[in-house]
Image (cartoon, rainbow, N blue to C red):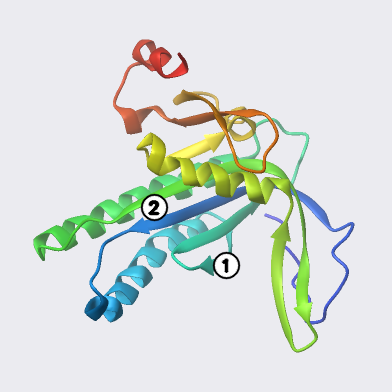
Amino acid sequence: MARFKRLKTRSAILGKQRRLLILSPGWLLLSWPRSFRVAYLATLNQYFDCVAGAVIENGGEVLKFIGDAVQAIFPIADRNNPHPQACVNALSAVQDTRNAIEDLNRERSALSEPPLRYGTALHRGDITYGNVGTMKRLDFTVIGTAVNQVSRIESLCKELGVPVLMSSAFAKSVSSGLVNMGTHSLRGIRGEQEIFTLQDLLGISRVDAARFRS
């Protein structure tokens, strides 16, 4: 899989564009009193192990840890392929993340600790990438509507009550096993957007899934 070239000096990012899948796992939901902040940081790192480990093992790249969120990408080698391997890899990373967090939650339950809840969004789109910042402090980043869109989709996970959501652009690359969760307004994104989730997360049949589109 092609990798981004991360330069050691600031460079113009205009013209450096790629089509890719963006995986945005965020909002680790826990409630801790102030005295438990150190324990929270330890838990946060356990969560990052689950997510980032799955991304890297499936050929993705972890770009950033932002608060309690992870920004990861899966570059698409052939932009004309309607079902790129990157889609398969991203879905594998999602499944591996789910399995890892389920294992972690079993360990937490045995210690009478609350389970971790999370949200993950998948989107396929074009981005611009490169180094930004000052000559004394550079950061590699990706920007564009696609980056904003995946963040807005991830924020719907709480509202819709499912841990994994994806855009219609990503859903078109998946042959089966999805449920249409209807159209939704995304802040800063023009027009209503169709949102999908994995059928097995809802435990429903294809026939029953139709009610989510009403």
Q: Amino acid at mark 1?
A: Lys
Give the residue displayed 45% in from the left and 55% down from the top. 26
Q: Residue furthest bottom?
A: 136
Which disc is residue 97 wearing? Answer: 2
Quadrant showing the C terminus: top left
Residue 102 vs residue 163, the one in the foreground: 163
Task: Describe the element under mark 2 as helix, strand or loop.
Answer: helix
Where residue 116 appears, as percent x and y from the top left, is 28, 56
Above or below 80: residue 54: below
Q: Residue at x 60, y 35 (%)?
A: 170
Badge nearest the viewer, 1 or 2: 1
In the image shown, does 132 or 49 lie closer to the viewer? 132
> Residue 119: where, in percent of width, then height?
42, 48
Residue type, numbered disc 2: Thr
**Where, by quadrant of the figure, is residue 2 drawn?**
bottom right
Q: How far separated are the C-alphas under marks 1 and 2?
A: 17 Å
**SS type, badge 1:** strand
- Check disc 1 and report the residue beneath it: 64
What residue is shown at x 58% (from left), y 40% (from top)?
A: 87
Q: Measured along the vertical axis of the image, is residue 37 above or below residue 30?
A: below
Report the label total. Answer: 2
Q: How many C-alpha atoms fall within 10 Å of the one at disc 2: few (<14), some, or many (≥20)? A: many
Camera sees residue 92: yes
- The quadrant in which the N terminus is found is bottom right
Quick check: 95 left or right of 170? left
Residue 201 in picture, x, y percent from top left: 34, 33
Residue 30 position by quadrant: bottom left
